[in-house]
Amino acid sequence: MRKPRAAEPATDEPADAEEIARYAVAEAVWAPSVHNTQPWRFVSDGRQLSLYADAERGLPVADPDGREMMISCGAALFNVQLALRSLGYIPETRVLPDPGQPALVAQVSWRRRAPASEFEQWLASQVHQRRTHRGAFDPEPLPHGTLAALRDSAARDGATLYIMADDRRRAVLATAVETAERAHRLDAERVREMARWAPPPGSVRDDGVPVTSYPAQPERTDPYFPGRDFAHGHGWGMPPLSSARLPRAAGVVGLLTTASDRRVDWVNAGRALQRILLTASTCGAAVALHSQPLELPWLREYIRTQVSDGAYPHLVLRIGMVIQAADSVRRDPNDVLLALGGGYAGSERR
Ligand SMILES: Cc1cc2nc3c(=O)[nH]c(=O)nc-3n(C[C@H](O)[C@H](O)[C@H](O)COP(=O)(O)O)c2cc1C
């Protein structure tokens, strides 16, 4: 969608509120979400945008508490805030503002203005470029200062990004991912649930994980962090970019955590995640995500006590340099935005 005219701090003339809300939602939908479920809906009312979790798009088997759904919504919330900043507005955000409406994740309003910083504009420019990486990385190191910037990104939203500097913790996380992945593949209910979000080649769906976004052959890394079996044995996926037969780099391994484990922490973890992903993207780095072991309560507890010093883990990240060819899909923003008084902004809701 075309970006609305940036706010002019020198004048009092506001840009059209509906146009701004549409723009913010068009940016929000490019947030990452578990299995690309895109579990969100938006309602705009003047200069306020409400973000709701869409339980119909939840994963009752893999994510019964809705933690990953809230992380996904938190990532979308970050994009809304960033879109407003890029237009020169200061977002005022209330997270989980109404205990009587648990699906209401956040309300964001905008009135005051301040020009976006250069860094905010860089982050905003990555929203459509960034893709989840699946596989190994090139051997070249991350640009100087990247990890410090990523740690700082997490801290700004009240989360912590642990970087696994020692081999023991890296190996523990790799084993946890592999153990969980094996367990998931043997769990018929989980396999069925994931298959619903992993459409076959040629699909015209605008959600789920398309075959253009993962490799047909799992790429071995050292240590090995197996990816999800989106192709569920059909051999779907992209041809390999590298002909290397030896294991390639797993990248720098990180763990995103929060000090407590309330719903608000999950939303904050999502905001932190998206800030991390976009910051990495500005540094030319890509990130692979592994939530497999965090979906098994006993393994999550093991990681919490053995790896993250008691902090609650949400996602394993692998960060590295690679040329990416992955592509993803999103629903039309008009299908997820209800303008009060105007119905869904575009075609009928599915
Ligand atoms: C909470 C959460 C958990 C995720 N877990 C995984 C995972 O275990 N494996 C994976 O390959 N991608 C994972 N992803 C990435 C999503 O699959 C990805 O964001 C989605 O398919 C959209 O693709 P994009 O990020 O390239 O736009 C996760 C994303 C989120 C927000």
Image (tube, grey):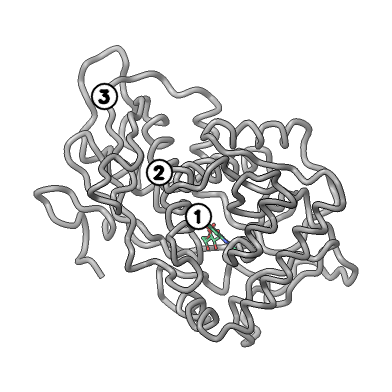
Residue tagged 2: 77
Classify 5 as above or below 57. above
Q: Nearer the viewer, mark 2 or mark 3?
A: 2
Determine crowd level at label 2: few under 14, some 14-19, many 20+ residues with C-alpha closer than 10 A: many
Disc 3 to disc 1, C-alpha distance: 28 Å
* Residue 242: image location, x then y, percent: 80, 66
Residue tagged 3: 111
Determine crowd level at label 3: few under 14, some 14-19, many 20+ residues with C-alpha closer than 10 A: few
Element under label 1? Answer: loop
In the image shown, does 261 or 222 lie closer to the viewer? 261
Which numbered marker is on residue 142?
A: none
Residue 256 shown left or right of residue 78 in the figure: right
Element under label 2? Answer: helix
Q: What's the amino acid at mark 1?
A: Pro
Q: Most extreme residue toward the right, as rendered?
A: 246
**Labels 3 and 1 touching (C-beta < 8 A):** no
Classify 285 as above or below 289. above
Residue tagged 1: 32
Q: What's the amino acid at mark 3?
A: Arg
* Residue 318: image location, x then y, percent: 71, 53
